Image (cartoon, coloured by chain):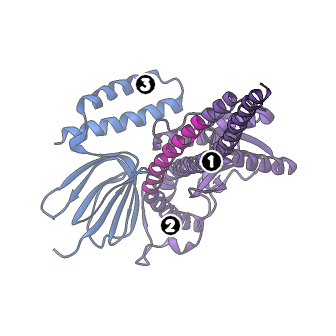
Amino acid sequence: MAETVEFELVSPERLLLAEQVAMVVVPGTDGDFGVLPRHAPLISTVRPGVIAVYKSRAEVSERIFVAGGFAEVTGERCTVLAEEAMPVGQIDREAVAQQLRDLAEDVADAKSDPDRRAAEAALAVAQAKQAAARSI
Amino acid sequence: MASLKDLRNRIGSVKSTQKITSAMKMVAASKLRRAQEQAEAGRPFAERMEKVLASLAGAVGSTGGGPRLMTGTGGDDVHLLVVVTSDRGLCGGFNGAITRETRKRLRSLTDQGKQVKLFCVGRKGRDNLRRDFANLIVESVMDVGRPRLGFADASAIGGRLIEMFEAGEYDVCTVIYNRFESAISQIVTGQQLVPLPPPEGDAAARPAGGAVYEFEPDEDAILASLLPRNLSIQVYRALLESAASEQGARMTAMDNATRNAGEMIDKLTLVYNRTRQAQITRELIEIISGAEAL
């Protein structure tokens, strides 16, 4: 297979991943989308979820959890700007379960609307993380 | 005339000072390398963010409107200055340069009849500005990035800035920090964060192929969630630059101090030797003249 997409995963602190891949599937806010070579230019927000990287068309070579961010897609390149990212295999299930309990309490305790919204957003991220950990 | 013992003590104390300053220089040099690496690592994200933002601004700008973080509140009556300094001293003119610039801006804004508020990051800046402008300081954070500067630190500050903006506490926000040029030179920079200055050159608004981006869900929604993050990124960048500058400034200052201490030791040693010599001569004369008198 000749054509590849240049996939880059960047966090504010460093460049996490930059490689040539056959396809990536990104969890966009409006639904997952796969990026193949010569994809139409697109900018999308990313919801908390799992990015699947396909080194070859047949199989997933890597699964990376991201806690939201942005994706910029052009014909040759797919750049994901993520604030928090880690390989699915590295998620500590117990830590996430603990976090979920804490955050659920935060949501219940929140006094004002903005506080509650912030807690709920954090909870959604933790839930997505747990789902990602379960998926393997 | 100082006695020999006094001189010995002074030489001893200058020597130990020299040891401390040269150790601090070495520590600063290694911290500087780390800070530089971190600043380097953070660059790709900021660059990509800028590009996305530029293409978005191009798309939204043509239709008019856009979130207030970008367009501003329409007024510019209340200015917020974010002053980034260090928590520790002994770094030459590092903090002085920042506070001087802050005072200059503050004066010129007040002369124009604007209201100014200060947001201090770092202990030194707060302590310095508190003397004259205690009532203007609305917020101060200290011990940022200890032990290690992370994006979380920046996003905490960014979040606070946005909260204040939403509450209508300011119209224009500028961050003042030391931009890292090299280990011996840091440049005081004022960067406007809110409203976002328009990106340079609108050529960036189009992807390489010449086609226009599609947006998902839509421009406004993306912009609304991107702008606050961009603010945090800019703050993060300022913090990183400032951290690297601080270590650079400290390294230079400590290098100078070590050299000065060396010069001082040389001078004192010379005086010490002369005094010792003179004392020996005097004692000899006393003995000889005593013997002659017999």
Q: Mark 1 points at which residue?
A: B253
Amino acid at dot 3: Asp
Q: How far is mark 2 from mark 3, CA to CA? A: 38 Å
Check disc 1: other Cα within 10 Å, few if <14, some if 14-19, many if 20+: many
Asked whether the residues under marks 2 and 3 belong to the same chain, the reply is no
Determine the colour of chain A.
blue
Name the residue at the front extreme: B294
Amino acid at dot 1: Ala
Q: Name the residue under label 2.
A: B55
Q: Where is residue B162 in the image (x, y as percent from the top left)?
A: 59, 42
Chain identifier matching the purple colour in the rendered picture:
B
Q: What stretch is highlighted in magenta?
A: B15-41
Nearest the eye: B100 or A19: B100
Q: Position of residue B6 (x, y in %)?
A: 69, 29
Q: How far is mark 1 from mark 3, CA to CA? A: 47 Å
Q: Going 74% across and 28% down the picture, which residue do you hit? A: B291
Q: Name the residue under label 3.
A: A106
Main SS of residues in magenta: helix
